[in-house]
């Protein structure tokens, strides 16, 4: 028997690097975000909500930055400078999540945990999209490989003149 060769071959699809990085970012950030959400439920009743959210934001940012550096953006940039730059992007996340929770508590004096978590996770997702763009464009930018050829040779400058 011979193998059938008339079957169409499946075209190999490649995923755009930006899409792949975003999917990895969502998985890593989403996992940390869900853990942070659970932590907020656990400690939110023991201290003021704003303080609890600040503490959780700092801890989850350090964890997420390491994951994003290694997994999401596959960057070789590490260290405190990266954490500081990434931490600055979290100011927006903190403002979104805290503002959303404060508005919720202003509208409902005692919202259920489900409603509170829905608001928190929605605000986190909105802030996360903006954070992805900033991290990709500023913090984890890829520097171009140095070229062996000079940028402008003397001959090019003379010809251009």
Image: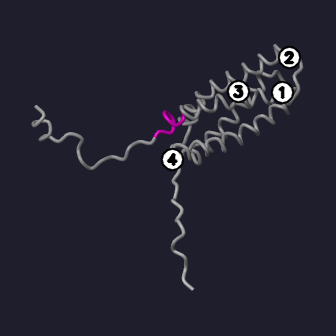
Q: Is residue 136 inside the magenta stretch?
A: yes
Q: Which residue is mark 4?
A: 16
Could you say where residue 84 lies in the image, as x and y percent from the top left? 57, 31
Label 1 packing within 10 angstroms: few (<14), some (14-19), many (20+): few
Colour scheme of the picture = one colour
Residues at marks 1 and 2 touching, judged by CB atoms closer than 8 Å: yes
C-alpha span from label 2 to label 4: 43 Å
- Residue 80 vs 119, above or below: the answer is below
Label 3 crowding class (10 Å Cα cut-off): few <14, some 14-19, many 20+? many
The residue singled out by tag 1 in the image is 115
Q: Earlier in the sequence, mark 3 or mark 1?
A: 1
Numbered range of the magenta stretch: 135-141
Q: CB under 8 Å between callouts 4 and 3?
A: no
The residue at the point 87 percent across, 26 percent down is: 46
Classify mark 2: helix, strand or loop.
loop
To which residue does mark 3 refer?
123
- Disc nearer the start of the sequence (4/1): 4
Q: Nearer the viewer, residue 127 or 77?
A: 127
């Amino acid at each position: 028997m011979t193998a059938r060769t008339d079957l169409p071959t499946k075209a190999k699809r490649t995923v755009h690097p930006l899409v792949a990085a975003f999917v990895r970012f969502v998985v890593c950030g989403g996992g940390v975000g869900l853990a942070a959400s659970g932590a907020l439920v656990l400690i939110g009743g023991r201290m003021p909500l704003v303080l609890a959210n600040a503490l959780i934001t700092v801890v989850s940012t350090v964890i997420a930055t390491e994951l994003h550096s290694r997994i999401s953006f596959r960057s070789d940039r590490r260290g405190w400078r990266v954490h500081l730059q990434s931490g600055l992007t979290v100011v927006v996340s903190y403002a979104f999540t805290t503002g959303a929770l404060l508005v919720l508590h202003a509208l409902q004096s005692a919202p259920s945990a489900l409603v509170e978590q829905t608001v928190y996770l929605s605000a986190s997702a909105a802030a996360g999209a903006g954070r992805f763009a900033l991290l990709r464009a500023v913090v984890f930018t890829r520097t171009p490989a140095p070229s062996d050829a000079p940028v402008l040779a003397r001959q090019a400058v003379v010809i251009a003149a």
